Amino acid sequence: MASPVFITNDQVKSVLTWPLINESIEEAFKSVVSKDKSSENQDQPYAQQNARARTSTHNNGASLFTMPGYIGNHKVTLETGDRKTFQTLACKLVTMAPNNNQLKPPIPSILANILLFDGQTGQLECVMDGTLITAWRTASASVVATKYLYFGRKNVNPSDGVTLALIGCGVQGESHALGMCTEFKVNEIRLWNRTASKAVELSAQLDTARKTFVNPNPIVTVCPTIGECVSDADIVVTSTQTDEPLLHLEMLKKDVHINAVGASVKHYSELGQNIYDVAPVYIDSWAGAKAELADLKTKIVCEVGEVILGGGKCTEEGISVFQSLGMAVEDAAVAQAVYQNLKKK
């Protein structure tokens, strides 16, 4: 029996692109909507996944999250241009240790590894560093949601360009900025972070990456307040660890789309209740929402996958919210795409 291979973060980085990961995330969104759980319909991906399980320690606040999932009939585009169908069984293991940034040298507070199995035999094929995949796939979920929930509106013309506001400029702020600017025409990027120096650092990073953007010359502004950051913004991303609401209805223009990404004790602590009172909310999966949004008082419309497949509709005006929770099948689909493209090398 062949030994599993270990795929490093640098190897993942060598093949991971925004088109590749966006395709995988779109397949994952569609898979959780499918009622056809068979391998016969090759045109429709389908999924089986459990809610995220958490194991906590009592000495340093660290936690281990386990995320098993299976995605069948999902498509992967190879570097050759061929598009092939795969059946993928995987499990992501994520550790969260809030005190890691105090180490010398500091290490990321969120670390991940993805175990990829043969879907037929159950044999472990590889152990893949999942830290970069976690950062990118979370941003990609927001990119795909924005593609359908904001740019899917009849009165929005993608060629006009948008103003993007980022609340939180850590790892997720960076990946969201890169993902959004690579996929959409962004005319202005506004940044706010509780520690202002992080926003300044991200501004410099974006300056070096602008040649990869749809619009290579966006205006980048570091804002002193959240209100200034989101004022007149078309798309807002919140990616913080706050326990208290940062964003309130009176700060926003009437037709904004919000990607709420941050994670704390609650997944929905970043937005004020007055936003949830008026905004339709879209989710990645009902299974995750039932487990993690049970106490959220709002109108959940549907899964993003339903909008992609035409069974659900995006709001044509007003505020919309994508409440991002993350799914095991997202990691499974992306890991398979990375693995297959590395095998070609």
Image (tube, rainbow, N blue to C red):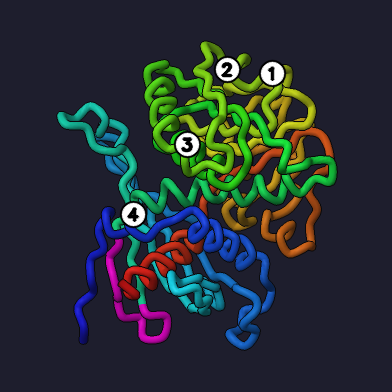
- Name the residue beneath numbered marker 3: 210
Q: Horizontally, is 47 left or right of 202 in the view?
A: right
N-term mark: 4 or 2: 4
| Magenta stretch in the rendered image | 118-128
Proximity of marks 3 and 4: CB atoms separated by less than 8 Å? no
Residue 312 vs 73, above or below: the answer is above
Foreground: disc 2 or disc 3: 3
N-term mark: 1 or 4: 4
N-term mark: 3 or 1: 3
Residue farthest toward the top in the current orientation of the protein = 224
CA separation in Å, label 3 and label 4 = 18 Å
Quadrant assignment for the N terminus: bottom left
Specify the amino acid type for callout 1: Met
- Inspect this view and state whether residue 267 appears: no
- Name the residue beneath numbered marker 1: 251
Specify the amino acid type for callout 3: Arg
CA separation in Å, label 2 and label 1 = 8 Å
Q: Horizontally, is 8 left or right of 117 in the view?
A: left
Q: Position of residue 299 (x, y in %)?
A: 76, 42
Q: Secondary structure at mark 4?
A: helix
| Numbered tag placed on residue 13 in the rendering | 4
**x 50%, y 73%: residue:** 81
Q: Nearer the viewer, residue 219 or 128?
A: 219
Residue farthest toward the left in the current orientation of the protein = 104
Q: Position of residue 56 (x, y in %)?
A: 33, 44
Q: Secondary structure at mark 2?
A: helix
Foreground: disc 3 or disc 1: 3
N-term mark: 2 or 3: 3
Specify the amino acid type for callout 2: Ile
Q: Secondary structure at mark 3?
A: helix
Quadrant assignment for the C terminus: bottom left
